[in-house]
């Protein structure tokens, strides 16, 4: 009896969805269908204020978790739960 590959549907074309789709495809154990509401270039991973940010002071600019928190809250018009 021939083995059949599993069929997997991934909803979302952001970093998580694309990463999952790539890993599954590389394993060659399943067929993947990727469904995205927006084009892949407009996923929320890309729209998140220019990318993904972290509080790492690698350039000596005085970045800190507190500054990062404030910038994140400010970027959301202070609407996020603090």
Image: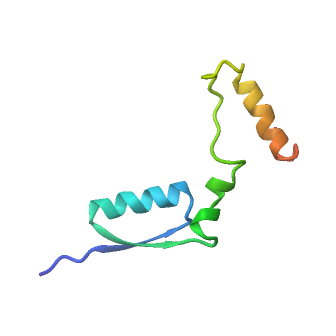
Taking the spot 27% from the left edge, 66% from the top edge, the residue there is 29
Q: Visible in this render: residue 12? A: yes
**Left or right: 71, with 3 as reference point:** right
> Looking at the rendering, which quadrant does residue 28 occupy?
bottom left
Vertical comparison of 48 with 72: above or below: below
Q: Where is residue 33 in the image (x, y as percent from the top left)?
A: 44, 74
**Left or right: 5, with 54 as reference point:** left
Q: Position of residue 4 (x, y in %)?
A: 23, 77
Q: Which colour scheme is used?
A: rainbow
Which residue in the rendered view is the most extreme toward the front? Answer: 59
Taking the spot 60% from the left edge, 22% from the top edge, the residue there is 58
Vertical comparison of 32 with 59: above or below: below
Q: Where is residue 30 in the image (x, y as percent from the top left)?
A: 31, 69
Q: Where is residue 19 in the image (x, y as percent from the top left)?
A: 45, 56
Taking the spot 66% from the left edge, 18% from the top edge, the residue there is 60
Which residue in the rendered view is the most extreme toward the left? Answer: 1
**Left or right: 10, with 28 as reference point:** right
Vertical comparison of 29 with 15: above or below: below
**Rendered-image quadrant of the N terminus:** bottom left
In depth, the one of 20 and 54 nearer the eye is: 54
> Looking at the rendering, which quadrant does residue 73 occupy?
top right
**Rendered-image quadrant of the C terminus:** top right
What is the total number of numbered labels drawn onto the structure image? 0
In depth, the one of 41 and 76 nearer the eye is: 41
**Left or right: 2, with 25 as reference point:** left
Which residue in the rendered view is the most extreme toward the bottom? Answer: 1
Q: Visible in this render: residue 81? A: no
């Amino acid at each position: 009896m021939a083995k059949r590959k599993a069929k997997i549907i991934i909803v979302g074309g952001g970093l998580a969805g694309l990463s999952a789709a790539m890993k599954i495809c590389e394993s060659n154990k399943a067929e993947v269908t990727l469904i995205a509401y927006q084009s892949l270039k407009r996923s929320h991973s890309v729209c998140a204020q220019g990318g993904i940010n972290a509080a790492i002071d690698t350039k000596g600019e005085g970045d800190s978790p507190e500054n990062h928190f404030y910038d994140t809250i400010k970027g959301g018009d202070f609407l996020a739960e603090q």
